[in-house]
Amino acid sequence: LSRIGENGSTGLVLFNPNPANVQASVTYMRRDGVNFEQPVTIPAQSRTVIAVQDITLPDGSLPLAGANFGVQVIAGQPI
């Protein structure tokens, strides 16, 4: 995780050094006990950047905007 800029935007950068795409699951755990999961494909020998504050749920809400949270990343290969 990295804080970027004056507005404190948070970015999550996932690196994949493998020669094939990797499937991963990112679980966000807010301080209030609400958890949700985001499936991610990280391209081979590349990176994926997630702008955490821009994550939108199906109801249109921004669950991590201004929230305190933790992150767990589980991937099928080392990343």
Image (tube, helix red, strand yellow):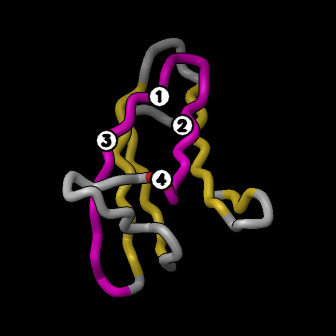
Picture coordinates of residue 52, whole percent (x, y): 51, 55
Q: Contact (CB < 8 A) between labels 4 and 3?
A: no
Question: How far is mark 4 from mark 2, CA to CA?
Answer: 23 Å
The quarter in which the C terminus is drawn is: top right
- SS at mark 4 in the image: helix
Q: Contact (CB < 8 A) between labels 1 and 2?
A: yes
Q: Contact (CB < 8 A) between labels 1 and 3?
A: no
- SS at mark 3 in the image: strand
Q: Nearer the viewer, residue 18 or 23?
A: 23
User: What residue is drawn where x is 31% and y is 41%?
Assistant: 39
Q: Amino acid at mark 3?
A: Pro
How many numbered marks are there?
Answer: 4
Q: Amino acid at mark 1?
A: Ile
Q: Contact (CB < 8 A) between labels 3 and 2?
A: no
Instruction: Relative to 43, say whether 39 is above or below.
Output: below
Q: Which residue is mark 1?
A: 42
The residue positioned farthest toward the bottom in the image shown: 32
Q: Which residue is mark 3?
A: 39
Mark linked to residue 66: none
How busy is the neighbourhood of tag 1: few (under 14 within 10 Å), some, or many (20 plus)? many
Q: Which residue is mark 2?
A: 79
Q: Amino acid at mark 2?
A: Ile
Q: Nearer the viewer, residue 53 or 75?
A: 53
